[in-house]
Amino acid sequence: MSLYAIADLHLSLGTDKPMDIFSGWDNYVERLESNWKKLITDNDTVVIPGDISWAMKIDECYNDFEFINNLPGKKIFGKGNHDYWWATKSKIDNFLKEHNFDTISVLFNNSYLVDNISICGTRGWFIESESDEDVKVLGRELGRLKTSLDCAVKLGGTPTVFLHYPPVYGNQECSEIIEMLNEYNIKNCYYGHIHGSKNAKNAVEGIYKGINFHLVSCDKLGFMPFLVR
């Protein structure tokens, strides 16, 4: 049983939002499916930390979720900034149950134990939160991260964090999130959101303040899930 991560699928199988207009995204759905099936087995788990579907409402997610559900392995969804369809966990769970999407679970104020790894995380927020609204959202995300981390500790595995927004980028950091990760002695953090080779140059990968950071956005990985363990 292996654990993988890949963010920013940006699927639009049920809506008109093609990603192949961007450089490097040509035939990306086919490439993702082919790579996934070569690598992932039904015994594996894949964490998808955000920007999963361009659908605006949960009821519009059917085609994208069906595509993901039919891929091998178990999948754990986190929220991204473009996941406008995201609702309460109970509403998402009910939608998954209604359509028998039984390989998909949602990471939202909770944690999952996969072998000896406790999967935890949240969306995160901007590196710099200056406006009152940004500060408010960041506080909410910190609360969700703490709840998830506490759940991970109770599960007994090694807490491993999956975020959508990078908590550090270039020479900037979201100090509140970094401090919380260090408080819980997190050694590995996986994030997405960053696209394009130019932007990826400023992405922090490797050890930063004792934490090993990994960028796992779809295009950065060549549409190939990244092996976590």
Image (cartoon, rainbow, N blue to C red):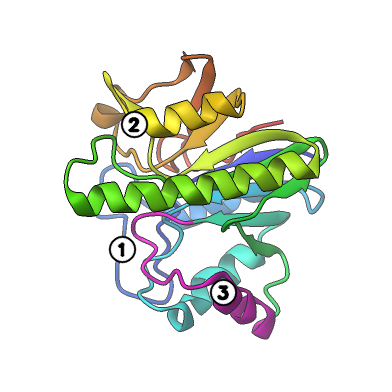
Of residues 197 and 3, the one drawn nearer to the viewer in this rendering: 3
Local crowd size for mark 3, using a 10 Å CA cut-off: few (<14), some (14–19), many (≥20):
some
Q: Quadrant of residue 96?
A: bottom right
Q: Position of residue 56 (x, y in %)?
A: 35, 75
Of residues 199 and 153, the one drawn nearer to the viewer in this rendering: 153
Compared to 144, does 3 lie above or below? Answer: above
* Three-letter code, disc 3: Ile
Q: Quadrant of residue 171?
A: top left
Task: Return the mark for residue 92.
Answer: 3
What secondary structure is marked by label 2?
A: loop
Q: Quadrant of the C terminus?
A: top right
What secondary structure is marked by label 3?
A: helix
State which tag comes first along the sequence, 3 or 2.
3
What secondary structure is marked by label 1?
A: loop
Q: Give the labeled residue for mark 1.
A: 18
Local crowd size for mark 1, using a 10 Å CA cut-off: few (<14), some (14–19), many (≥20):
some
- List the single residue furthest toward the left: 131
Q: Is residue 182 left or right of residue 27?
A: right
Q: Position of residue 169 (x, y in %)?
A: 31, 27
Q: Give the labeled residue for mark 2.
A: 174
Boundaries of the magenta span:
79-99
